Amino acid sequence: MKAVFIDRDGTMGGAPALEFPTDYRPFAGTREAFDLLRKNGFAPMIFTNQSCIARGKDRGYDFAAEFADIGAVDWFICPHDAPDRCSCRKPESGLLLQAKEKYGLDLTECYVIGDRWSDMAAGGRVGCRLILVRTGRGEEALSVDRDKWRAYQPLAVVDDLLAAAKWLIEQGGNE
């Protein structure tokens, strides 16, 4: 399985940080990116921090319906807030390790697409191949936050999720 882990807020759409999940709107090209990945043998999965759940601001939002509708193969959600110090909240790698366990993945053969340093650090820590998008907080990840993930190098820095999907397909998943 060529798993591609995709961050939600700032990568797929919406603002980099949303108080309420109902404020989320996908960027143009997000659905096309998921379709392209699936049609080309990749398994797009979402991995996302959603502290709105711990804060009681999710209002019963149906993340599963959203993610299924966009075409995700699966999704892994950290429902905790930063003070909870869990192992699944990015920059920790717990969500990726959950997917590894569930699907028997070799994470060094998997990809992470995200806009934040915490996405890159979570993937880098377990050997995933990294692609940074410039949407959301991508520019911050490359500048003021670069020291937080300096140990890891992205394979590509692209404009948005659709460009990341196209880059992966052009590379054939064999960069």
Image (tube, rainbow, N blue to C red):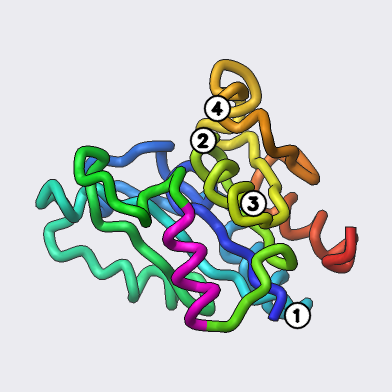
Secondary element under disc 4, as helix, strand or loop, is helix
Residue 31's quadrant in the figure? bottom right
Q: Is residue 32 visible?
A: no
Mark in the foreground, 4 or 2:
4
Q: How many marks?
A: 4
114 relative position to 26: left or right: right
Secondary element under disc 2, as helix, strand or loop, is loop
* Alpha carbons under labels 3 and 2: distance apart: 11 Å
* Alpha carbons under labels 1 and 3: distance apart: 17 Å
Secondary element under disc 1, as helix, strand or loop, is loop
- The picture places residue 43, in percent across and down from the top left corner, at 64, 76
Mark number displayed over residue 161: 3
Q: Which residue is drawn at the image coordinates 88% and 65% (left, top)?
A: 174
Q: Earlier in the sequence, mark 1 or mark 4?
A: 1
Magenta range: 93-102
Question: Which residue is farthest top?
Answer: 144
124 relative position to 117: left or right: right
Work out whether 28 lies above or below 32: above
80 relative position to 172: left or right: left
Foreground pick, 130 / 147: 147
- The picture places residue 104, in percent across and down from the top left corner, at 59, 82
User: What's under tag 1, amino acid-wise?
Assistant: Gly
Where's the N terminus, which quadrant?
bottom right
